[in-house]
């Protein structure tokens, strides 16, 4: 950040549909500010969150070339988010937008409003501006995997930028779909063995038919397809054969089933995905239309995706039999027929039902492509349940990996069916589309390293969940190694984990520096809560509307991710006068930045140990995992912490009273 | 790298019990890399000490400072203003740094804040392993690049002993047998014949006393 000499500030005062009228005279506030502060534009609005207002603000941003906004009124988190989005869409960074709450109890008067607005104005005018960096990027996209899914991704992306598709195998279903197409290069017998660099400029190392090769790409799409795997144990040991086929065998053969009785069995395998359901339904419809007599035997018909429900309705309308079973089933085959015996859950009977068919089609499980584990290591992307790519974390859906510039499409991250695939392809296309123009403009908001304090210890490098850090060597770096860690602006997601782990305190995250955070707890109330902005901060705002008085003796310090909550922040809050400290973090496996909340857990343990070492109660520190909408949980946690503190009494270690 | 472990705060509190103002001296060298003595740890320890003493009703003033390396005089000089202010210094550098700091500032007690452990590697965040004991006569050429002195529990030069079991040392299931590692490495290198080569016993007798290294061609006459 550098000192900004060209601040063009817009100030908006909202009277919340007249709600503020009685207590605060906004005209007076406006007059006072106008007389003192330096700004480009000021306006009083009646209801800033209204739709028309937004259009008006957009016009004003343009007309007055505003580059900072101050919005005074309510600070409803939902409305705040609307304004930050609006600002970002109009070229103003979210960190250049400040909100002032005019509804603070006790300060709801004209003087109070003037004083808080002035305070924030001063901050905005003295601090440096967000600097933007123009970064050259490569538009070339690498797609790994040339099945039909990889081909679909390549076709979509190639509309706007060049694509290279590689596959270790020589025979893949997707090759014929894309070979010779404009903007697409296909290479087979090629394995990815190394990756260096950052989004926009990845250097990929290949083993190209046994020879080492390398090429640079802006972004990477992984499309290694899952493979069907028939497990006889799921069907009481039955073997596949003439009359018993796996679903994937069935899809591949082109026998004529007219006049034959065909039964699909679902629910014994592939229980966690919709792929078998979607495949069975579409094939059942086609078969029935061609004159076969089709049944689907299911325990739980899963149709919870776009268009699957329609397929189900259509299948029924075409005359496909849907038969529900319960628990185990037995399969017997003879030369002329295949029989299933099963329990019908709704008919109170003791006998099992016998269903005789000409052919049985059995759903199978899907397992990750055999290259998955190796490729995950090479690319440093994470895998999740079942060994598939992508962790079990809603923040990463649909196509994101833990690294910027690397995306998952299709069954590489678990079996998915056609409609989901189309959506993923569209999303991935949009993501890699950012690189198409060859140039990206990003705010340089990644952490900054002071070389003098960097011991090049690699701790940050190893702790970064997003592989966003490199160690650079440069004569200008003023330490004995002439080297220091550097965060890449395109790869960094600004979680702050690195800053909290650095043993040299060399790393500072803009807008969340140690100084700024410790300043907030320099004279803390009884209880300090370090809150993740994705959960704790929002839960706190919500909780305030439920029980405002609970927050009177509580200071909330927001951080972008709980991974930013330094052990030092906890000790310092206690040293400087708090009686207790809470960490408010996201639920397990739901951290937007992979493992920030796990790190926070560890730091809580560390600080409890450190307190025990000096004879202070570890209970003065606690961690709560919660979601943004759990205002009640927030209040309950604060109440129980306050009770605990009251029991323990005042913190005997506080140095500043 | 030199690997150290933090002393217990209890021990440190005892050492500084008589004092009302101390300096915690950090080092940006090895002890920062092994997460035990950099600016961060200096801050954490200082905070703990202040709170502990406050709680006893015996407050203490704690200064904090970290320099590039405590094993070089030029960097140690940076402590002078703070050292002058305090009654004692707790150094979080390795034993080398602590001693040199104590030597340079002879009039102030310098106390160890860490236990210096070994020369080792940092496999991952929070994991260190001993690799070398600075014996002065390296034999890694004969042992496939694995040190038998530092990594064999008995420092056997011609191993393994009879206690080697499934690649583990008899002292603990968690300790790899260095000689099993050496065997595997030599076999991967196609140098198994080196297993039969006898390595003569080292002369551990320190006839010249504490070691010193002087490179005459590099030393300057200074007066
Ligand atoms: S953690 Fe800190 S000291 Fe270590 S490499 Fe990163 S910036 Fe440097
Ligand atoms: S802020 Fe987070 S994403 Fe960025 S470099 Fe640090 S650890 Fe990595
Ligand atoms: S004083 Fe010790 S810890 Fe510090 S740099 Fe020197 S050898 Fe390493
Ligand atoms: S033999 Fe072992 S202890 Fe001796 S110098 Fe080599 S590595 Fe170090």
Image (cartoon, coloured by chain):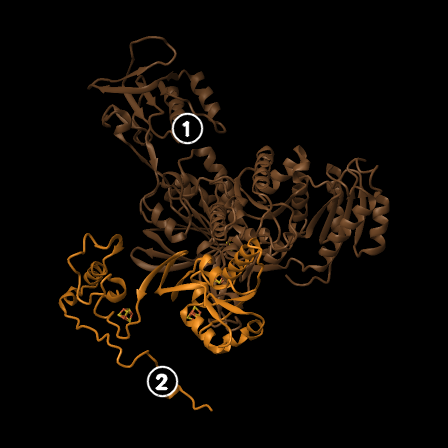
Chain colours: A brown, B orange
Confirm if mark 1 falls within 8 A of ligand 2.
no
- Residue A375 position, x and y percent, is 37, 50
Image quarter where the N terminus of chain A lies is bottom right
In depth, the one of A224 and A66 nearer the eye is A66
Quarter of the view holding residue B128: bottom left
Neighbours of disc 2 within 10 Å: few (<14), some (14-19), many (20+)? few
Residue A223 percent location from the top left of the image: 41, 44
Mark 2, mark 1: which one is toward the viewer? Answer: 2
Indicate the quadrant of ligand 4 in the picture: bottom left
Q: Is residue A591 in view?
A: yes
Residue found at x 52% / y 55%: A500
Mark 2 element type: loop
Is residue A563 positioned above or below B196 on the image? Answer: above
Dot 1: what SS? helix
Decide if ligand 4 comes within 8 Å of the CB at mark 2. no
Of A351 and A433, nearer the camera is: A351
Residue B145 appears in the figure: no
Residue at the spot of label 1: A278
Image location (x, y in percent) of residue A443 = 61, 56
Q: Is residue B134 above or below residue B12?
A: below
Q: Quadrant of residue A367?
A: top left
- What residue is shown with label 2? B215
Q: CA distance from mark 2 to mark 1?
A: 78 Å
Dots 2 and 1 on the same chain: no
Q: Is A266 drawn above or below residue A175 in the view shown?
A: above
């Amino acid at each position: 950040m550098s000192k900004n000499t060209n601040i063009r500030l817009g100030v908006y005062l909202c009277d919340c549909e007249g709600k503020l009228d009685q207590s605060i005279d906004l005209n007076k506030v406006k007059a006072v500010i106008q007389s003192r502060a330096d700004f480009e534009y000021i306006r009083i609005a009646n209801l800033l969150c209204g739709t028309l207002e937004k259009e008006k603000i957009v016009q004003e941003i343009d007309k007055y070339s505003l580059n900072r906004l101050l919005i005074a009124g309510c600070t409803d988190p939902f409305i705040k988010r609307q304004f930050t989005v609006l600002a970002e869409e109009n070229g103003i960074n979210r960190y250049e937008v400040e909100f002032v709450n005019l509804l603070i109890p006790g300060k709801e008067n004209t003087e109070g409003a003037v004083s808080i607005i002035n305070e924030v104005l001063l901050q905005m005018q003295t601090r440096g501006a967000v600097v933007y960096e123009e970064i050259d990027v490569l538009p070339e996209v690498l797609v790994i995997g040339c099945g039909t899914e990889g081909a679909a991704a390549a076709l979509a992306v190639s509309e706007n930028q060049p694509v290279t598709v590689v596959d270790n195998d020589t025979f893949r279903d997707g090759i014929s779909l894309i070979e010779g197409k404009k903007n697409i290069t296909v290479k087979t017998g090629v394995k990815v063995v190394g990756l260096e660099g950052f989004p926009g400029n990845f250097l990929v190392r290949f083993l190209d038919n046994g020879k080492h090769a390398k090429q640079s790409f802006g972004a990477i799409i992984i499309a290694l397809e899952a493979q069907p795997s028939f497990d006889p144990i799921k069907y009481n040991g039955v073997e596949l054969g003439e009359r018993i086929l796996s679903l994937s065998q069935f899809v591949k053969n082109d026998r004529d089933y007219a006049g034959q009785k065909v039964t699909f069995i679902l629910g014994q395998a592939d229980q966690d995905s919709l792929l078998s359901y979607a495949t069975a339904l579409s094939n059942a419809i086609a078969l029935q239309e061609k004159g076969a007599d089709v049944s689907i035997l299911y325990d739980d018909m899963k149709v919870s995706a776009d268009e699957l429900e329609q397929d189900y309705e259509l299948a029924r309308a075409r005359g496909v039999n849907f038969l529900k079973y319960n628990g185990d089933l037995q399969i017997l085959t003879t030369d002329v027929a295949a029989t299933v015996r099963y329990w019908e859950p709704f008919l109170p009977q003791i006998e099992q039902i016998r269903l005789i068919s000409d052919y049985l089609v059995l759903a199978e499980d899907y397992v990750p492509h055999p290259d998955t584990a190796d490729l995950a290591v090479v690319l440093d992307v994470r895998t999740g349940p079942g060994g598939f790519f992508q962790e079990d974390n809603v923040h990463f859906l649909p196509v994101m990996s833990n690294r910027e510039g690397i995306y998952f499409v299709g069954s590489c991250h678990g079996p998915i069916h056609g409609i989901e695939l189309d959506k993923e392809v569209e999303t991935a296309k949009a993501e890699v589309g950012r690189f198409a123009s060859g140039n990206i403009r990003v705010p340089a908001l990644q952490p900054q390293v002071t070389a003098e304090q960097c011991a090049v210890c690699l701790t940050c490098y190893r702790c970064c969940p997003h592989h966003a850090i490199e160690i650079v060597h440069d004569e200008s770096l003023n330490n004995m190694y002439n080297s220091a860690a550097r965060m890449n602006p395109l790869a960094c997601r600004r979680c702050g984990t690195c800053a909290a782990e650095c043993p040299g305190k060399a790393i500072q995250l803009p807008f969340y520096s140690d100084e700024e955070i410790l300043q907030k707890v320099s004279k803390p109330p009884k209880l300090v809560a370090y809150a993740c902005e994705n959960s704790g901060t929002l839960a706190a705002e919500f909780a305030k509307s439920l029980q405002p008085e609970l927050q009177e003796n509580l200071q909330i310090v927001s951080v972008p991710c709980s991974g930013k909550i330094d052990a030092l922040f906890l000790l310092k809050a206690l040293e400087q006068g708090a009686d207790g400290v809470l960490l408010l973090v996201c639920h397990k496996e739901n951290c937007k930045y992979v493992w920030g909340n796990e790190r926070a857990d560890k730091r809580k343990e560390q600080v409890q140990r450190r307190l025990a070492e000096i004879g202070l109660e570890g209970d003065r520190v606690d961690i709560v995992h919660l979601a943004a909408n759990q205002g009640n949980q927030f209040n309950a946690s604060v109440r129980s912490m306050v009770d605990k503190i009251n029991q323990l009494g005042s913190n005997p270690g506080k140095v500043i009273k | 790298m030199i690997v150290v472990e933090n002393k217990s705060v209890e021990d440190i509190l005892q050492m500084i019990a008589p004092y009302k103002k101390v300096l915690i001296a950090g080092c940006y060298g090895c002890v920062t890399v092994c997460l035990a003595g950099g600016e961060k740890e200096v801050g954490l320890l200082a905070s703990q000490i202040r709170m502990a003493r406050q709680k006893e009703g015996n407050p203490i003033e704690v200064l904090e400072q970290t320099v590039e390396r405590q094993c070089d005089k030029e960097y140690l000089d940076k402590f002078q203003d703070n050292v002058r202010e305090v009654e004692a210094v707790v150094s979080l550098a390795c034993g080398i740094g602590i001693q040199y700091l104590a030597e340079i500032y002879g009039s102030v007690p310098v106390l160890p804040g860490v236990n210096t452990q070994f020369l080792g590697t940092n496999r991952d965040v929070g994991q260190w392993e001993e690799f070398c004991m600075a014996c002065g006569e390296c034999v890694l050429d004969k042992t496939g690049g694995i040190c038998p002195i530092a990594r064999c529990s008995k420092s056997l030069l011609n191993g393994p002993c009879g206690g080697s079991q499934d690649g583990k040392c008899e002292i603990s299931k968690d300790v790899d047998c260095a000689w099993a590692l050496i065997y595997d490495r030599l076999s991967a290198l196609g140098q198994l014949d080196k297993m039969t080569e006898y390595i003569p016993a080292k002369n551990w007798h320190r006839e010249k006393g504490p070691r010193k290294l002087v490179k005459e061609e590099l030393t300057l006459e200074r007066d």
